[in-house]
Amino acid sequence: MIVPRPYNLIAELTYRCPLRCAYCSNPLDYAGVREGLDAKEWARVFRQAAELGVLHVGLTGGEPCVREDLAEIVAAAAEAELYIHLVTAGTHLDADGLDALVDAGLRSVQLSLQDVEPEPADRLAGGAFFERKLAFAAWVRARDLPLTLNVVLHRGNLERTRDAVELAARLGAHRVELANVQLHGWALRNREALLPGRAQLEAASQAVREARRDHPKLQIVFVLPDHFSDRPKPCMGGWGRKNAVVAPDGLVLPCHGARALPLEFWSAREHAFGVCWSDAPGMNAYRGETWMRDPCRTCPERERDFGGCRCQAFALAGDAAEADPACALAPAHDVVLAARRRADAAGEAPGLVYRGDR
Amino acid sequence: MSQGRAAFEARLQDVLERRYHDKHPFNLRMHQGLLSREEIQTWVRQRYYYQTRIPLKDSVILTKSGDPAFRREWVQRIHDHDGRAPGEGGLEKWLRLAETVGLDRGDVESLAGVLPAVRDACDDYVRLVEERDLLEAVASSLTEMGAHRIMRVRLAAFEKHYPWVDEEGLAYFRSRVSQAARDSEWGLAWVLENAATGEEQDRCVAALEKKCEILWRLLDAVELAHRKPRIASAAQLRNDPKDGALTAVLPERAVRLNESGREILEACDGERTADAVARELAARHPEVPGVEPDVHTFLGEMERLGVVESRR
């Protein structure tokens, strides 16, 4: 097999986070994962990734800013000539801390917002964070860094979709990602509370069309949730194809969620990054097309969607090699249809299970 | 419902009142004396392409009429533009204007530096006349009703603010004051006479609006050519670690560039205008056709992708 060149490295520096979002994409057992890589080891990973062709690094977590050695890690990524993007909740860093990162080579920032108003935002995140996030956004723009706002949309906040765009415009963001909740990790445990109904989604889609007309310069990303699209997404741009995730313990993965699958991945603490990327059995399990079954195997869409999401197939169909149940052609699509019917019929939303609650 | 002639004429006047390019920011600055010599040059060089399309669209209009009286009148416009002999006519006068503002006559005539957006706008005008019927074609020419007014303002502005443009250079504007007044008077009377139904009147109003939009787009393109592009602060320019290709890395994407792209971006220092960059590259590669429009297209695409940002 020809091993593709990775372009983007997602560096999960830690799973620690002051927020307790009920849709966190970290694994359910995150607390048991050791934070293994120190700044020097990250520097080695960055060097090796850059040699392989990686251009971007996204520093994420958990909350990457809880790491005391973050400026050192940023400097190491800059040393490897990577484009450094920080994905943060914006609650942990003050203006001086941000300056230190900029001096070290930080290029751009993605800030997560749980909602556009303090009360529901803080309820979802499990603490009073909203006002600090807005202050952080202003610091980012004052330093002329490109700012992306990421707002996770779900049943509880979809009606404020338009407000989210207006807030992004006010904050001077160049891009806003209106990310409909994906049902992985903690979100799957909260499916009944988070999954929106069809009418809600249609209203939000209309709001996005109007917002695009009114803000032609703002990049507005809005993607229907898998449960309503009937087509699978090209998850991560294909398994082990363009994007590599390195977890806090050094495990090299094709995506944030793949460690939950019964596969063998290797750690960048024990092997060179390139070896973990190209040779680990787990990385090769779903690379390319040879693993595909019907209907994916002969489907003309496979070159575009790469068969969709393996983690979703595992979670909903019980087998990661099955077609993504989000696809209308998948044998297990019934599971998705049933969830959709429940969401359309749902009355009062159940209470949330927060990240960290068992 | 057809409206009375007066009401119909008022609608046409209203289109000009709202949309004629005398209100375009570029023309406002021209008439206030705020344009640089370089901006005047760009405008003269680009607008020449529009001038060359005028006799073409008038020839198309001739083919649409079966009426000898109409053709006798309309053919006069072609004579006005092309002259009765070499060295005469509006096109020749425009080239004299080009020379007085410091342009190379041969370069202007070659149309080598016509901006893609200017070409699109002017070609849209010829296409409009080709595709629509005689009534709409004539109605679209009624921007001439605004032309004689704008020419008076322009003449005064040039005499006051741009004294380096000499009398010979202003001959085009002077001749248009009377020609446009005569032509628009005749054209307006013909349209008022021939648009009998409400539907025909509506089509005339729409055609005139479309023509105003075309003139506006031409000036948009000229203005855009004077923005000063530079590498966006969000972009990191680097060589690809695998094959050395120049690559612009942005928050959400990476853009690979070829050697021409590298040369253009290296010229984008935030001080030179897009027009100056395009001219410099064309001068550097005289053997390659179409450099200038290619540079403008490339810069537009780079701006869209976020690799380049501009200030005025």
Image (cartoon, rainbow, N blue to C red):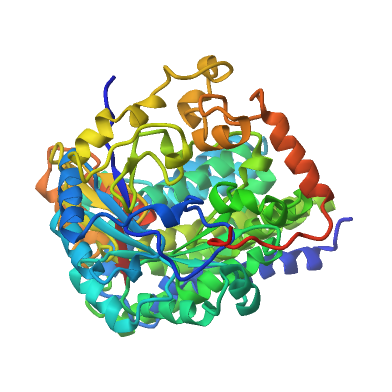
Towards the viewer: A47 or B237? A47
Residue at 68% in and 55% down: A194
Which x, y percent locates residue B189?
70, 59
Towards the viewer: A314 or B194? A314
Residue at 62% in and 35% down: A316
Q: Is residue A46 left or right of residue B121?
A: left
Q: Is residue A136 left or right of residue B307?
A: right
Q: Is residue B276 left or right of residue A162?
A: left
Name the image quarter holding the C terminus of chain B.
bottom left
* Above or below for B272 versus A324: below
Residue A107 seen from this side: yes
Towards the viewer: B165 or A94? A94
Residue at 57% in and 57% down: A23
* Above or below for A99 versus B207: below
Which x, y percent locates residue B292?
25, 48
Name the image quarter holding residue A74. bottom left
Residue at 55% in and 61% down: A355
Name the image quarter holding residue B193. bottom right
Which x, y percent locates residue A15?
40, 59
Residue B83 seen from this side: no
* Above or below for A265 versus B48: above
Towards the viewer: A170 or B146? A170
Which x, y percent locates residue B7?
80, 67
